[in-house]
Amino acid sequence: MLEQKRGTIINMGSLGAIKPLDHHGLYNATKAAVHSLSEMLRQEVAHSNVRVSVVAPGAIDTNLINTTKNPDLVTGHKEYVSSIGGALSAKDIAMLLLATYQMPQHICIRELVVGATQQVV
């Protein structure tokens, strides 16, 4: 990308990096690191016309919650997702990633924070 003087890197952050989620300290911290590293990389490569973006979604409908062994966490998560009218889908995120990539090369969406309309946190 540096040699070609163009390119796009899109990293997956999280709303948890911006508005920390209760009982998710390690997750919040790792996603905050993704945001910080993305910004530092963006600054380093911007003069070579390389874009670096970070997408920070809120709740996404994935199978990850089903891997936990704590039934209270699963129940709490499902109740929360229901209370916000449902989580974003993988297709929603894919559309955002594509739109970010398809912007003209001179436009860099540095950070895109997105969540379900009813998700207030």
Image (cartoon, rainbow, N blue to C red):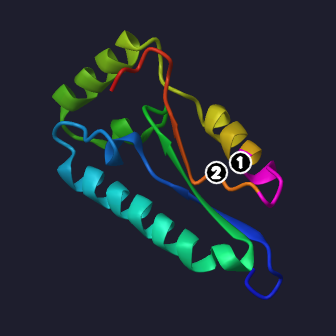
- Which residue is label 2 attached to? 109
Q: How many marks?
A: 2
C-alpha distance separating marks 1 and 2: 7 Å
Is 98 left, or right, of 116 in this rendering?
right
Is 94 above or below relative to 54? above
The magenta-colored residue range is 100-106
Is 20 inside the magenta-drawn segment?
no
Q: Tell me the residue at 36%/36% (across/down).
A: 66
Residue 24, disc: none
Residue 100, disc: 1
Mark 1, mark 2: which one is toward the viewer?
Answer: 2
Is 21 above or below relative to 53? above
Is 105 above or below relative to 61? below
Is 101 inside the magenta-drawn segment?
yes
* First-in-chain label (1 vs 2): 1
Q: Amino acid at mark 1?
A: Thr
Q: Secondary structure at mark 2?
A: loop
**Viewport quadrant of the C terminus:** top left
Q: Tell me the residue at 54%/28% (across/down).
A: 88
Q: Tell me the residue at 17%/27% (across/down).
A: 72
